[in-house]
Image: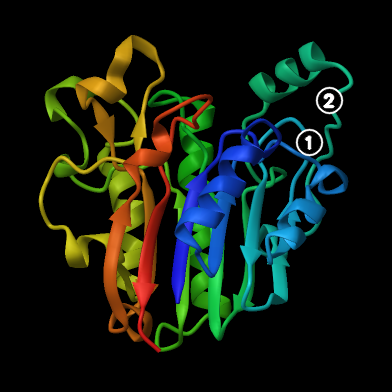
Amino acid sequence: MRIATWNVNSLKARLPRVEEWLAQRAPDVLLMQETKLSDEAAPDMPFQMAGYELAHHGEGRWNGVAIASRVGIANVVTNFGDGPVRHSPGADAIAEALEAEASDTSADEARMISAVCGGVRVVSIYAPNGRALDTPFYRSKLAWFDRLARWLRDTQDPGGSLVIGGDFNVAPADEDVYDPRDFVGATHVSPAEREAVAALREWGLVDAYRLHHPEPGKFSWWDYRAGNFHKGLGMRIDHLYATRAVADRCTAAEIDRDARKGQLPSDHAPVYIDLTD
């Protein structure tokens, strides 16, 4: 069983790349983030033609998460079960941008969807960016991670089969950035953010990629600007965290850098793990 995660940075814009990648890598489950679509606009038919069911949770122009599975989708949960999120169909981009700038909470944003696929509870997450330390956006990011941790404690069993994958917007260690000196005083690497991810490990999750790649210099995101991808100036902020029951089945883990190349790529690369039966 292959489980993958990919921040596609607009599923509408990147759909041909996603279809190509599904054909090449054949994941059984693909967790997607930043789809930037409403549920009504989700491309169900292309995924069906590729052999996948699609569960989508979106609000329109911003955020959005999804699960594509060819091993079934059951017991879907969105937004931690807290109810609906905002709906922004995109009729007025300027007004929406102002609304997003003014927001100091992520509680009404489409950032979490979960389902049981092939006997494994999978969770696709798109954590808030945080923008800058000591801002409402940063505090909202930490609160969002607290909500994720509470959902795990209240509804899940660390002894079960569960995988949380997605864009965590956190590099858990200095080895996950190209040069820690360039990130002093920045988000994604602050002690509080790293502690929030460490709390997930303390609950019972394992960084599945690190089981097979303990070496530094492995990244999943590169800024579009200044040729950072070709210079190797990246961060590892996309993760697949698994309970021990799943981690013990993990035979391989990879970051597919090739998917970051070519025409109109996402700024993120897919990350995937392979599990034995």
Looking at the image, is 48 positioned above or below residue 122? above
Marker disc for residue 90: 2
Query: Badge 1 local density, few (<14 within 10 Å), some, or many (20+)?
Result: many
- In the image, 77 versus 119, the foreground residue is 119
Please identify the quarter of the rendering in which residue 208 is found. Answer: bottom left
Residue type, numbered disc 2: Gly
Q: Measure the C-alpha gap from mark 1 to mark 2.
A: 6 Å
Q: Residue at x 46, y 83 (%)?
A: 161
**Closer to the camera in the image, 245 or 11:** 11
The quarter of the rendered structure image containing the N terminus is bottom left
Q: Position of residue 68 (x, y in %)?
A: 64, 61
Q: Quadrant of residue 221?
A: top left
Asked if 248 appears above or below 65 in the picture, the reply is below
Query: Looking at the picture, which amino acid does disc 1 mark?
Result: Gly
Circle 1 residue: 60
Left or right of residue 71, residue 190 in this image? left
Q: Are marks 1 and 2 in contact (CB under 8 Å)?
A: yes
Q: Is residue 75 left or right of residue 276?
A: right
Q: Residues within 10 Å of mark 2 (few under 14, many from 20)?
A: some
Residue 95 in view in this figure? yes
Q: Quadrant of residue 261?
A: top left
Label disc, if present, on residue 17 of the rendered structure: none
Quadrant of image for the C terminus: bottom left
Residue 96: percent from left, percent from top:
77, 21
Q: Name the residue rendered at 10%, 51% in the picture.
A: 215
Residue depicted at x 36% and y 53%: 196
**Residue 82 visible in this rendered orientation of the protein:** no
Residue drawn 45% across the image and 45% down it: 142
Which element carries disc 2, helix, strand or loop?
A: loop
Q: Where 205 sits versus 186, above or below?
A: below
Q: Position of residue 249 (x, y in %)?
A: 32, 83
